[in-house]
Amino acid sequence: MDAGSVAIAAAIGFLGGVSGGLLGVGGGILFVPALVFFLGLSQVAGESTSLLAIVPVAVLGAWRQRRYGNVRLVAGLWIGALSIPGVLVGTALANALSQRALAVAFAGLQVFLAVGLARRAVRGRREATRS
Amino acid sequence: MPRRLVRLALIGCLAGAFSGLFGVGGGSVIVPLLVLWLGFGEREATGTSLSAIVLIASLAVIVQGLHGHVHVLKGAIVGAPALLGVVAGAALQQRIPEWLVAAIFVPLLLVSAAVLVF
């Protein structure tokens, strides 16, 4: 773990935080590769450690967004609470199905959602330029 | 149970399954589902997603911590600068139109999907 690797990991961490504030994600998609490729963790340890880094980032981000009036707290708490059975369902699915099939299914869901958001963005931009 | 609550429950379950299976990705499905399925504004969806992630990640890190996979110092190397980043990102988000938030989300989803498959 030399100084250069630490600096790069810290810079990627900063970008992960920006994506959290801007897009409402935890930043794991950037934290995990930073931890694995630059700080020498295994994939499993990288994912676990990423979750640890996400907690304070999400707390601070949610607090800032609440100050901006962008948090519907009851909805957020419902989603958070119901993720617990989700984790159990996910674990059961992982035992029943192949990891590959699950990865493809989730990737398909993400592509589907990307198309929906892209259409919305195009429509929103058109309305913004018209007015 | 009202339909809204059923949808919130399904989003929570999906996000939990996603993060339980792949270690990342709660937010990448929560935000678009809140926008496309429950009619949230983009800013509202991202703020609400972060509040849900607080719970999801806290529970997950407790479970993972029990298995001894968590490295606190290395977590701080990426997590401390991320604290500055999240404040900057949230401030930036208030200054751009909501359609642009949706537009920036599209490549994030596509990259995340590609990482899952390849």
Image (cartoon, grey):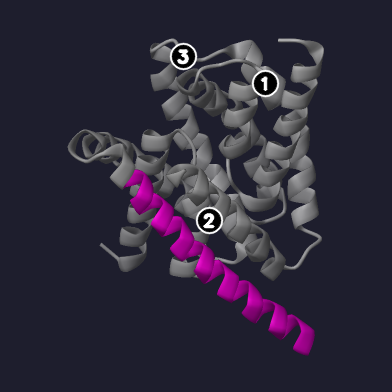
A127 sits left or right of B58 in the view: right
Mark 2 against mark 1, which lies toward the viewer?
1
Query: Residue placed at 53% from the left, 47% from the top?
Result: B112
Q: Please give the label number shown on residue B31.
A: 2
Q: Secondary structure at mark 1?
A: helix
Q: Above or below — where is A114 with respect to B89?
A: below
Q: Chain of mark 3?
A: B
Q: Nearer the viewer, residue A124 or B56?
A: A124
Q: CA distance from mark 3 to mark 1?
A: 17 Å
Tell me if residue B83 can be seen.
no
Residue reaching furthest left?
A96
Mark 1 belongs to which amino acid?
A: Phe
Q: Nearer the viewer, residue B98 or B106?
A: B106
Asked if the magenta segment contains residue A124, the reply would be: yes
Query: Residue placed at 54% from the left, 49% from the top?
Result: B49
Mark 2 belongs to which amino acid?
A: Val
Give coordinates of residue B86: x percent, y percent.
Answer: 72, 40
Q: Above or below — where is A73 with respect to B5?
A: above
Q: Which residues lie in the magenta part? A: A102-131
Q: Which residue lies under the disc numbered 3?
A: B69
Q: Which residue lies under the disc numbered 1?
A: A38
A37 sits left or right of B40 in the view: right
Query: Residue placed at 55% from the left, 55% from the top?
Result: B110
